[in-house]
Amino acid sequence: MLVQTHELCSVPSLDHDYGMEDYGKGVARWCPGCGGHSILTTVQRVCKDMQYEPEKTVVVSGIGCSGRFPHYMGTYGFHGLHGRAFPVASGVKFRRPDLNVFVVTGDGDCCSIGAAHWVHAIRYNMKMVALLFDNGIYGLTKKQTSPTSPLGTHSNTHPRGSVLPPINPIQTTLGLANVSFVAQTVDWNSAHLYATIRKAAEHPGLAFVRIVQRCPAFMRDLYGDIAVNPKNLILLSHENGINLKPKARQAFGRVIEHDPSNIHKAREHAEINNGIPIGLLYQNTDNARYDEYGAHNIGMGVEEKKQNLESLLDQYSTSNSV
Amino acid sequence: MDYIDSGDILNEGDRIKPRKIKQAIVEIVSDSGEGAQKCGQSFGAISAKMGNGVWTVEIIPAEIQPPARSREGASGIRVRIGSDKVTNMGNHADLVIALNEQVLYGRIRQDAYNENTLMFIENKWAKSEQESVRQQYSEALLKFKELGIQVIEISMEEECLKLMPDPRKGKNMWILGLLCYMYDRDIPKAENQIRKIFKKKTDEVIDLNIKLLQAGYDWARENLPFHYEVTPMDVDDDMVVMNGNEALSLGVMASGIELCSMYPITPATSVSHHLAEYFERVGGIVHQAEDEISAIGFAIGASFAGKPAVTVTSGPGLALKTEFIGLAVMAEIPLVIIDVQRGGPSTGLPTKVEQSDLLAAIYGEAGDAPKIVLAAATIEECFHFVVLARKLAESFRTPVILLSDANLATGVQPFPRPKIDPLWLTNPIDQSPWKDGAWPFGWDEKTGTSKRPIPGQKGGMYTVTGLAHGQTGKVAYDPEINQASVESRSRKIASFQKSLKSPKINGDPEGDILLVGWGSTLGAIEEAVADARAEGLKVSSLHLRFLFPIVPGLVDIFKRFKKVITVEINYSDTLGHPMVNQENRRYAQLAWLLRAQTHMDIDCFSNVYGQPLNPEKVLKMIKRELKIENSEVKV
Ligand SMILES: Cc1ncc(C[n+]2csc(CCOP(=O)(O)OP(=O)(O)O)c2C)c(N)n1
Ligand code: SF4
């Protein structure tokens, strides 16, 4: 089964038909009801539907609950350092355009300790899918305030309520240089989650997806009842956006037509705060790609390398007349 | 010194016959931006091409743009040329050419000159419109003469004005011409050198500079009573000449490394400049990351994916990289880390030499993170050790830290042209299916080594983790597994140590003093030892290239000397201060390491003046240790 992929993705092999079991490994050890479970299954489904070769797929994560993600994938994985998933993933992709790369990061991981790398990864715009698991709290370390915690969040570091307004990751990403794909979805709407990650996987550049993630252990009240009531999800809809079957659309109380090529409108929608706008906020497939620069001279033969090296040494030679 | 004694200079028509000397130390100093370094580098390159031994050291002011004519603002270069191989910057300069007299004060304070030094000084300041400048000039000349230095005033500006309206940009080539006469350098080689350095400029610029060269040469022939010949060596070897950072960059290219991931930091940055110029033509690429943490993370990602990578940095950058180095140790990802050391701690002395990162390199990470640490001692080793480091990194599946320093970075020295082995350049990436059932960390029981799967290899899928893990690669908190895995990573280093040879001793295998050094101090230490031995002193030396693990056989060697002293450019407490005693004394870093590893009472001689070590200081120390009074060496 051959799936249409971008030229720099691995070409799925014809003699294989990978099933869900090829993308899974072990038993996920997240809390019951954690949003991580559904995201894991959805990523596995997308891999299967794209028929990514497991050995040509690398999932890179940072540290946090979300950091455990690659351990549950049947692909290659890299569970690295807190905040540093982007640099590692970028290094993997730079000279290996044949690999499919996923980045899994948390809100502390991406928007706090790894914020510098987030800014620059967006600018590098290398083909990969970046999933921000945003539960608005530090989960793994047991309930400290995150940069995305809503103002007034009671946490172990701010028992009387957090005192600063949160970072809006979507709004921030839309303000970064060379941004090429920004989408938002929620872990509990599987149709939309799937359609979003699928669209991200097909994007020729860095696809940044913020997934609003439930953390029943420490952040039951993220967004108050907005999260509880599906009517509070606002669907951004467009023929070039993330499309759902008509039946799936009916679950949404509000639908806004939004052309994802319009970055100004995207920034406006990013600021909606009486509901969660989900869908494709922005996409541009023409942006500069750093992985194309990185891969431009891969695979040079030993002979050519040696020859060019010798002529470089000639320039330093004392017997060289010039 | 007989250097400026012109008694036996013979007249040969209107030319004086050059007098043979074995070596010369020449400095050119100026305000920054006057091309002194270009002049000195060219003089060094021409000398190397003639077959002389050469060593150059850049003289760099602490500030980027110090005010003109400031005492500590000397910018320039020292060039030492010799009939034999030259391995260090030597002691006092024989000749210094100064474009203003003020910058000489700073150099005098740094003990660069003595009463045998000859000074050529630009004399336009004597006619300055500003009275204060005229006064400073005459005061300085008096002062230098008081110090016993022979000063010759030269109207360099005036001479150059004959050829160009703004001599600030041309004086350096006029001086090069003067030097070419004085040391009997080949004029055609000098012209070629000018063509090389101005290759991006127009023909007019090149012609003008050649004219300046010739004018300087002619002026010197008419006016100077000094004319020397430094006989070249007979070398059959095809030689190359470059500085340490160029050698590192060539080493990176020759090692088969495909990616240099870096963040700019002095004095390491120029490695990446050289790479950026040429790397892509030999199948590699430079990535300038957003910071040092990202730089090493990127390199680790590439290496994990089978693409050999290096990250190049200096002290503050090394500090930022430690968490990732720990991960590379834990996850057994090959990686070369080059640290071109500078003065520390913190921002320290960015352009000056220091060897203070040794213990940080060996022990800097949190947790137990053994890895291989090497140090290059010569420019030639800067090249070959990158090739070696990459090989070790892959064979032992470990990060390897290669230490260089600011002295090697800009020092220029000729060495035999490396013979590139095509095997170095082959891509190690193995994409054949992973052996069925093999673990991603199948540690060999005896050696601790293992083979790693690389993305793309069918059946090898595993997840790298910095969490404790066993041979299967799965996260494991089991106490036995943790003990065994930490042990395996340590065993790897031990099995590498078993393959090392005991180091060679410079001098007799027993005696009164053994000096132990590492890194760029090799030449100065060996020259001091040669001088001491020539005076009949029982002194030998030893230079370590492998710092971790430590080479075998040291205890046996050390036992045969009455005293073992490390010589290093880093800090140690000196006994004698009321606050310092045997119990709290802080030792120089190699001494600390050797004391711990050998259980022997090893002393140290070290300082942090930010200057390369010179042989005289080491010789003085040797004599002090041996309690030789009335030493010929002046303090
Ligand atoms: C350098 C470093 N600092 C701190 C930590 C501790 N730490 C681990 S995860 C984490 C926060 C995780 O929060 P988030 O990224 O939101 O992920 P979540 O656990 O909520 O998925 C922290 C502070 C660490 N592992 N490394
Ligand atoms: S703490 Fe929260 S984010 Fe972490 S596993 Fe539990 S529910 Fe999920």
Image (cartoon, coloured by chain):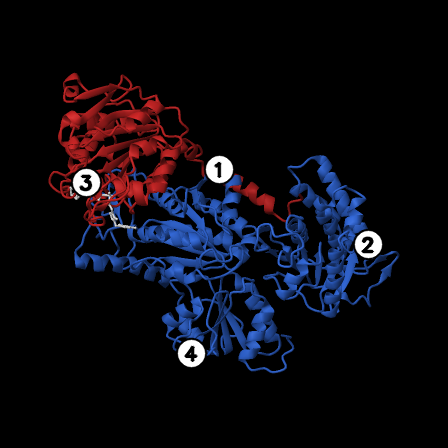
Chain colours: A red, B blue
At label 3, the amino acid type is: Tyr
At label 2, the amino acid type is: Arg
Q: Position of residue B534 (x, y in %)?
A: 62, 75
Host chain of mark 3: A
Q: Is residue B594 visible?
A: yes
Which of the numbered marks, if any, corresponds to residue A72? 3
Farthest residue toward the right? B13
Q: Residue at x 39, y 60 (%)?
A: B360
Q: Quadrant of residue A127?
A: top left
At label 1, the amino acid type is: Glu
Residue at mark 1 to residue at mark 3: CA–CA distance: 38 Å
**Lower position in the chain sequence, tag 2 or tag 1:** 2
Task: Give the quadrant of the C terminus of chain B.
Answer: bottom right
Dot 4 falls on a residue whose secondary structure is loop
Q: Name the residue under label 2.
A: B221
Above or below, B221 relative to B115: above
- Is ligand 1 less than 8 Å from the beta carbon at label 2? no
Which marked residue is nearer to the observer: mark 1 or mark 4?
A: 4
Q: Name the residue under label 1.
A: B280
Residue at mark 4 to residue at mark 3: CA–CA distance: 57 Å
Residue at mark 2 to residue at mark 1: CA–CA distance: 47 Å
At label 4, the amino acid type is: Asn
Dot 2 falls on a residue whose secondary structure is helix
Q: Nearer the viewer, residue B337 or A134?
A: A134
Q: Name the residue under label 4.
A: B581
